């Protein structure tokens, strides 16, 4: 096996707090950005940067106040999957940005019923003792999303926490939003998604057991489930792979098929990643697969030989793309 392209290890330094009723004194008093942070895109990062600076000025930790499940998922559990990342992937990304306290509050009936004032008093002030909060200009909170940023400013002045409202971020692609990123991925435009994310769109999760057909074809793959995630356009991609734990931690190049495997009559989408110049057992390891370029749609071939020939061509194309990064 070749050595990984880049060796990276991410020490765990971020604490996760899930109940505002039971918070250790050492975990109170942070400067936080509030939101759902699905994708942790450039707009989210701008809000986090403001919270970080406010925390440095006040000499308090940087925190994130978010919710699990996503309120949209709570209110419409049967709607199509829309999340750009799992909660674990979000936590990984936030930790890399220097977040020290992740207040991942349980969004349940009691939380949904809090009025804007009660949310400010019970969660922000009494529960977490926050020093400063930063939100986007479109932020709404409390029962029925009835609280506005003006309400938050007023509560902060009354209850003793600082409030900063960040402008909505735009760039050459347009207004940065999770909705625009989902559309770019649906269209098979991962580079446009990355331009708004500030990083490659990544699918993260454990490697699960598969049918080992790839191994039989000479292209062993690491298989990952896509449950609960927004599906990018089905097809084959050039990808950047990070192995996050286990003996093969590091960064690699590869090609991945995102789809239902029409050659074999499957109908549940998953992600199958072939890592170039790699041999090793990755079952159970946590992978992060970044989508770089869309190569082609899923196809059904007349023979296994034709499939293998196309896989070789896909890998050659992906190697060229990734070598140019």
Image (cartoon, rainbow, N blue to C red):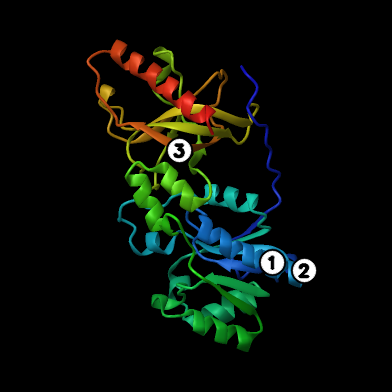
Per the model, the C-alpha gap separating discs 1 and 2 is 9 Å
Where does the image place residue 165, in percent across and percent down from the top left? 55, 75
Would you call the spot at circle 1 few (<14 residues within 10 Å), some (14-19), or many (20 or more)?
few
- Mark 1 vs mark 3: which is more N-terminal? 1
Residue that numbered label 1 is attached to: 53
Looking at this view, name the residue that lies furthest to the bottom.
158
Residue that numbered label 2 is attached to: 59
- Mark 1 vs mark 2: which is more N-terminal? 1
Quadrant housing the C terminus:
top right
Task: Please identify, in this view, whether the residue under mark 1 or under mark 2 is nearer the observer.
Answer: 1
Q: In the image, is residue 4 above or below residue 182?
A: above
Task: Please identify, in this view, whether the residue under mark 2 or under mark 3 is nearer the observer.
Answer: 3
- Mark 2 vs mark 3: which is more N-terminal? 2
Per the model, the C-alpha gap separating discs 2 and 3 is 38 Å
Q: In the image, is residue 154 above or below residue 47?
A: below
Quadrant housing the N terminus:
top right
Q: Are marks 1 and 3 in contact (CB under 8 Å)?
A: no
Per the model, the C-alpha gap separating discs 1 and 3 is 31 Å
Where does the image place residue 78, in percent across and percent down from the top left? 30, 55
Dot 2 falls on a residue whose secondary structure is loop
Residue that numbered label 3 is attached to: 291
Would you call the spot at circle 3 few (<14 residues within 10 Å), some (14-19), or many (20 or more)?
many
Is 149 displayed left or right of 17 in the figure?
left
């Amino acid at each position: 096996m070749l050595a990984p392209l880049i060796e990276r290890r991410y020490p765990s330094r971020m604490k996760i707090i899930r109940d505002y009723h039971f918070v250790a004194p050492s975990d109170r008093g942070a400067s936080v950005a509030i939101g759902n942070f699905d994708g942790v895109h450039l707009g989210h990062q701008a809000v986090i940067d403001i919270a970080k600076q406010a925390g440095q000025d006040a000499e308090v930790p940087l925190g994130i106040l978010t919710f699990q499940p996503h309120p949209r998922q709570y209110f419409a559990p049967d709607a199509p999957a829309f999340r750009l990342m799992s909660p674990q992937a979000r936590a990984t990304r936030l930790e890399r940005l220097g977040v020290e306290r992740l207040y991942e509050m349980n969004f349940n009936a009691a939380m949904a019923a809090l009025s804007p004032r009660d949310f400010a008093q019970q969660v922000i002030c009494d529960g977490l003792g926050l020093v400063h909060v930063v939100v986007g200009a479109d932020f709404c909170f409390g029962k029925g999303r009835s609280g506005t940023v003006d309400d938050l400013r007023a509560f902060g002045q009354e209850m003793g926490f600082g409030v900063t409202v960040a402008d909505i971020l735009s760039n050459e692609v347009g207004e940065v939003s999770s909705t625009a990123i989902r559309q770019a991925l649906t269209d098979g435009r991962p580079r446009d998604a990355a331009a708004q994310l500030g990083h490659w769109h990544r699918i993260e999760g454990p490697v699960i057991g598969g049918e080992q057909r790839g191994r039989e074809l000479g292209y062993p793959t690491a298989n990952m489930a896509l449950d609960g995630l927004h599906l990018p356009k089905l097809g084959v991609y050039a990808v950047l792979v990070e192995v996050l734990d286990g003996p093969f931690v590091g960064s690699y190049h590869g090609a991945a098929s995102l789809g239902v495997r029409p050659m074999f009559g499957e109908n549940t989408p998953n992600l199958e990643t072939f890592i170039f110049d790699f041999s090793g057992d990755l079952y159970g390891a946590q992978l992060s697969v970044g989508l770089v370029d869309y190569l082609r749609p899923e196809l059904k071939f007349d023979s296994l030989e034709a499939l293998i020939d196309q896989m070789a061509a896909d890998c050659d194309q992906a190697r060229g793309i990734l070598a140019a990064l």
